């Protein structure tokens, strides 16, 4: 791994830094998991798109800058260091788009990518169902072939921000006679279609961050299948490793949080060896995560893939995030709850890290069986 950046990469970083410093909203936006906050975030994301900063690593024809993987990582660092808001379009741009780039037809790419980057078409993720979370392949929502398309039926749950989105992608059982992983198809569904009911509900912190989506005989045309019929599992799984290993949580986010923690420690003038040790550890962990990510990026640039070790990455960032926030709350002591919600809210969301993107228990199973080669029982 070579950590010397090229002149081109440094010039890109400087341009991104200058733009972000000049344009990031001065006042923090409201939570993107409320209707009002979501609208504020969209305004920001649209401004980013207008100036071609919303999807820097995508080809120019879809609104990007054709930036390299290294440049994307540098952009992410600058993004969070500038205090920019979290991305409410992430389910589209970070999770669906990579699958479209890999499996989509040219027509789908032309039709879907640009409006997604522009924050005009907003996507929710519909994997989980009541009774099918960790064991996703047990899902029961169905797709039945009809003239020109498919009829979808069933229920999806825990769909992040689906109340504020216009589309959802998800897996449906298209062939009940095949083994469970094999009869699933990946569909893209307008949430405005006849037969769709979206019911929002609150998270632990009170924001309406989740929704359940009910589907009753919802017609979806053939052109809205991603990949092949009955092979949706492989489309979905191809992107989960890049989600866990790289795209969902870039190091910039944790570096910025660790820097804020150091600022908090200094502001508090805390003279406590144990807390100082924990603050230092938080900073070192964030730096270690950064270096590990550059190593992963180097591997990808050498033509290798992200494999099952992505699970180690996911366990690491999610547990690091909780520890960093716990240290902040201890520094704030009695004032933690008065902190206008920033550290407390961050802590509450960090608690979800070991659950979403595949629970950490499941990741540990993957590490044991697939990385370490331990027996299944
Ligand atoms: C903030 C947040 C956002 C989310 N956003 C979305 C979204 O947008 N779209 C979407 O589809 N889903 C979303 N989810 C849902 C998430 O993917 C599921 O919660 C997760 O996959 C776990 O499924 P479950 O909740 O059904 O728990 P279960 O699968 O029922 O698991 C319950 C517990 O049992 C453990 N467990 C289960 N099986 C095993 C096993 N074999 N070995 C060891 N332990 C096991 C789990 O680790 C967990 O601790 C989100 C969740 C959160 C918290």
Image: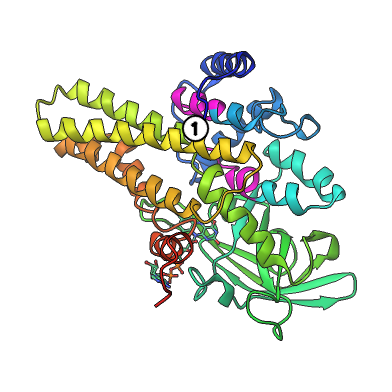
Q: Can residue 67 be seen in this view?
A: yes
200 part of magenta stretch: no
- Where is residue 150? Give x, y as percent: 80, 72
* Magenta-drawn stretch contains 88: yes
Image quadrant for the C terminus?
bottom left
- In the rendered structure, the answer to whether residue 145 lies left or right of residue 323 reads right
Name the residue tied to disc 1: 85
Is residue 340 visible to us here?
no
Query: Magenta stretch?
Result: 74-95
Q: Helix, strand or loop at disc 1?
A: loop
Image point (61%, 44%), residue name: 94
**Is residue 161 or residue 125 the one in the foreground?**
125
Q: In which quarter of the image is residue 352?
A: bottom left
Disc 1 residue lies near ligand 1 with CB under 8 A: no
x and y percentages locating residue 173 in the rendered image: 68, 76
Residue that protrudes farthest toward the bottom in the picture: 177
**Residue at horizontal 39 percent and vertical 30 percent from the top:** 255
Q: Where is residue 1 in the image (x, y as percent from the top left)?
A: 51, 31
In the picture, measured across the screen, residue 70 lies left or right of residue 287, that is: right
Q: Of 87 and 9, which appears nearest the observer?
A: 9
Give above or below for 58 relative to 3.
Answer: below
> Which quadrant of the figure has residue 179?
bottom right
């Amino acid at each position: 791994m070579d950590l010397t950046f090229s002149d081109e990469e440094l010039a890109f970083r400087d341009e991104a830094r200058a733009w972000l410093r000049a344009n990031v909203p001065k006042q923090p936006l409201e939570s993107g998991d409320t209707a009002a906050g979501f609208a504020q975030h969209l305004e920001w994301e649209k401004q980013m798109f207008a100036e071609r900063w919303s999807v820097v690593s995508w080809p120019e024809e879809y609104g990007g800058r054709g930036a390299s993987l290294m440049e994307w990582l540098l952009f992410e660092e600058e993004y969070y260091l500038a205090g920019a808001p979290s991305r409410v379009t992430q389910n589209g741009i970070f999770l669906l788009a990579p699958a479209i780039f890999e499996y989509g037809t040219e027509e789908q790419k032309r039709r879907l990518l640009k409006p997604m980057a522009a924050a005009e078409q907003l996507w929710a993720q519909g994997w989980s169902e009541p009774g099918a979370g960790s064991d996703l392949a047990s899902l029961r929502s169905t797709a039945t072939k009809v003239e020109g398309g498919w009829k979808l039926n069933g229920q999806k749950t825990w769909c992040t921000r689906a109340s504020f989105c216009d589309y959802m992608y998800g897996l449906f059982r298209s062939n009940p006679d095949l083994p469970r992983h094999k009869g699933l198809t990946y569909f893209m569904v307008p949430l405005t279609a006849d037969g769709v009911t979206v019911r929002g509900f609150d998270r632990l912190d009170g924001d309406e961050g989740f929704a359940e989506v009910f589907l009753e005989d919802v017609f979806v045309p053939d052109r809205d299948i991603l990949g092949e019929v009955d092979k949706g599992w492989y489309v979905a799984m191809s992107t989960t490793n890049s989600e866990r290993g790289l795209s969902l949580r870039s190091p910039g986010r944790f570096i910025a949080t660790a820097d804020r923690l150091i600022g908090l420690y200094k502001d508090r003038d805390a003279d406590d060896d144990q807390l100082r040790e924990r603050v230092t550890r938080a900073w070192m962990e964030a730096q270690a995560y950064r270096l590990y990510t550059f190593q992963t990026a180097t591997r990808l640039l050498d033509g290798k893939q992200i494999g099952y070790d992505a699970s180690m990455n996911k366990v690491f960032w999610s547990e690091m995030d909780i520890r960093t926030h716990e240290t902040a709350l201890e520094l704030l002591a009695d004032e933690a709850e008065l902190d206008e919600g920033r550290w407390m809210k961050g802590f509450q969301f960090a608690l979800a890290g070991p659950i979403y993107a595949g629970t950490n228990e499941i990741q540990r199973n993957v590490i044991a069986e697939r990385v370490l080669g331990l027996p299944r029982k």
